[in-house]
Image: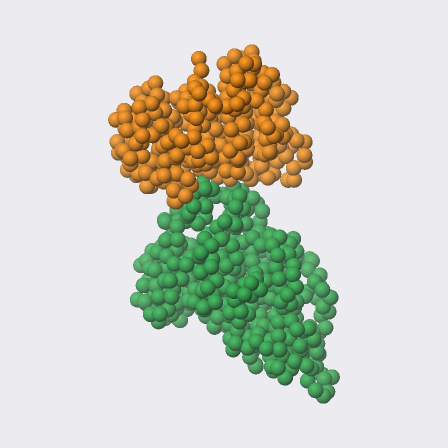
Amino acid sequence: MTYRTGLSDPNENIRNQSTLLSLPRFSQRFPHRHFLSIEGLKRTEILNLLDLADHFADANRRSSDLTKSLSGRTQINLFFEASTRTQSSFELAGKRLGANVMNMSVKGSSMKKGETLIDTAMTLNAMRPDILVVRHHAAGAAELLSQKVSCSVINAGDGAHQHPTQALLDALTIRRNKGRVEGLTVAICGDILHSRVARSNIYLLNLLGARVRVVAPSTLLPPHADRLGAEVFTSMKEGLKDADIIMMLRLQLERMNGAFVPSTREYYYFFGLDYKKLKLAKPDALVMHPGPMNRGVEISSSVADDTRSVIQQQVEMGVAVRMAVLEALAGNCSGDEGEI
Amino acid sequence: MSGFSPIVMTAAEAGKPVALVNARLVDPKSGLDEAGGLIIEKGLIADFGPHLFRPPEGDNENLAIVDCGGDMLCPGLVDMMVFAGEPGYRHRESLKSAGMAAAAGGVTTLICMPNTKPVIDDVALVDFIKRRAHDTGFAHVHTMAALTKGLKGEELSEIGLLCDAGAVAFTNAYSSVMNAQLMRRILAYAKDFDALVVHYTEDRDLAGNGVMHEGEVSSRLGLPGIPVEAETIILERDMQLVEMTGARYHAALLSAARSLDIIASAKARGLPVSCGVSINHLAHNENDIGPYRTFFKVKPPLRTEEDRRALIAGVKSGLIDVVVSAHDPKDADVKRHPFAEAADGAIGVETLLPALLRHYHNQELSLPELLRPVTCNPAALLGLETGEIAKGKPADLTRVDLDVPWSVNPEELHSKSKNTPFDNQQMQGRVVATYLAGRQVFPFVEPAEGEGAR
């Protein structure tokens, strides 16, 4: 079973013929030491990553085909914020490539004892990992860390700033289902203000030539959202009209009940994705969600489980995309002394 | 520090008058800007003018002569907003280290902020600062006292007694008095003592958990923003309360073009108001934050380039009365965090004058225009006998080589904390010597070591 249709990629034939030996190579080495943000990446770099992830997605379905290109490398997953989904995805990705993976959940341990982010980073750096995967509640945390350690840093989400692997996996899911990203209309709906997923997706989808909309009540829109590269809508009726892709975002419970929206039921009535609202989009529209979902808050259970929903595929692509990013950075892992 | 001998100091201490000749005299109060010289006698300016361009004719045996080599000689600066670390935060700054930074930056008068530990809201603490500052002796030091007890914004401090003790003004530091009723009473009460109320204007609720200017940049960085309205709402409210009470009011730190409109309109109505900006807001804008550089995290937040340009225009037109360093020493421990969690504040007393001189070199401001808000204007607001070149006034003077290029090395600055946003930036113009009541306090006579002795 494959999701791919009409992908016009010159390498496709080669890739389909064989598996491992023809691992899609970057025309140039991935030119970044860290993977912190979609901003700053070039279109070709993203396409290369997507091609590589495409390969891994196929290979993952035939577990015998896996390469061990990260064999002997150490990957530390440093999570200051709990995230079962992202952390296990990175863990699996690293392990499938043969890396030694260590998980560190810092929440509630040393940070509570007054250790700062930089202390933690320097401690871990002294253990000489090759790759540090970081999730932190503060925007810019991964960037700050990357300045202090000598290994490669992957941003697995920093506050409301960026979640670049999520955007890549979304793009891969779209591409495998629709055959392209260019020219599609993507409506990102929900809590845009606090969403790193939305920010990463807006940049990436623009780079790949999609038309991006954001749909949310004004209290959940960042100032000047239009200047980020998205058309702004405050009603689902207009925002979903003729959309090819609907991306729903999670609304944190603490932001309901009067702080940003009056109540869960009012939010669901106006912004929750149900069949009635889904009808406004194109008939073959895809429904996406980065998870974890609040069923009955931003999405109805039946829509979440509908055939148009690709939410489970997103999870699968997540592993493939993270393998691609790890693989790309592995070529750049150096033994340089970082200045601390 | 080039080889300037402390001859002047010994001569002055011996009571021998000093002639500073071959200088470019700039006095913003009188508009003076001409080649000339100046004579210091018994700590006062005895004479000045073009006739002293060369050493006086005749017998100069009892006159120490210093050739300024064409350097600018201007009044010593009055920095109206300095956090000097004492009491309570000596690890960040001390009156001595702040005083040395001031002397090296041509600042002869420091106005200390009361947000110390304990808060300066008591006559004993005002007295403490006076005595401590006298001991260190690198600059005149005055203190503002807290506007409300403990800076909590709940009860009036003892404005009358604090005035008598020597507090030069009253401020609530970096928090605004949110209660309009209390603010009205503060202003009404302060009016009875002719006390100056220096207020930071930021609506606490509207600013919320914001950490930078609210706009496109904050949206991109994923950081919560502080809208301009947080400043203008409180400022507008205060203007109406000033109109009700007639108190003397100074908006401590403005950041936005729209705030200047409010000040302009209040001044046009004849209200006794003035306003200040920090050098950081004249030199930088929101884009300087770039990849989360926390040395650019200041209060109020750096705003847009249009705002920055408007502030410079405001200094030029005189609408902005005062420029301060907003010197706020913070050690690396509280700055090296993700942006939202890092402390606010930047040091600046030592770089205040060089940073202002950039606007002279790029022809945005004339020397009198840029000196006015750091000399005679704050002196007049605070009722201080300094900030001008006039016969009989204290010889608080700064000699500046206007052209020498240099780059800012934080390690060479004298503040105990190194959080300067001017880190590694290029400057043109540097202080050559600083005189405090006729006594040369910079270059330092002894090497600047032994810090911590006090």
Which image quarter holds the N terminus of chain A? top left
Task: Choose top left, top right, bottom left or bottom right for residue B65.
Answer: bottom right
The structure residue drawn at horizontal position 43% and vertical position 64%, both measured from the top left corner, is B275
Tell which of A69 and B264 is nearer to you: A69
Q: Is residue A145 above or below residue B254?
A: above
Colouring scheme applied when the structure was drawn: by chain
Label count reads 0
Q: Is residue A16 visible in this depiction of the protein?
A: yes
Give the percent coordinates (x, y) of residue B342.
51, 45
* Residue B306 in picture, x, y percent from top left: 44, 56
Q: Is residue A130 above or below residue B239?
A: above
Q: Quadrant of residue A151?
A: top right
The C terminus of chain A: image quadrant: top right
At x 47%, y 65%, the residue is: B315
Would residue A330 be found to the left or right of residue A206 on screen?
Answer: right
Q: Nearer the viewer, residue B304 or B137?
A: B304
Which quarter of the figure has residue B55? Answer: bottom right
Q: Is residue B213 left or right of residue A13?
A: left
**Residue placed farthest to the bottom in the image?**
B58
Q: Position of residue B169 (x, y in %)?
A: 45, 66
Residue B291 screen position, x and y as percent: 53, 43
**Colour of the chain lettered B:** green
Camera-nearest residue between B125 and A7: A7
Determine the residue positioned at 41% across, 23% down: A178
Q: Is residue B411 above or below residue A69?
A: below
Which tint is chain A? orange
Q: Is residue A131 visible?
A: no
* Residue drawn at the location 71% of the way across and 70% of the way down: B6
Give the left or right position of residue B137, taking residue B208 as reference: right
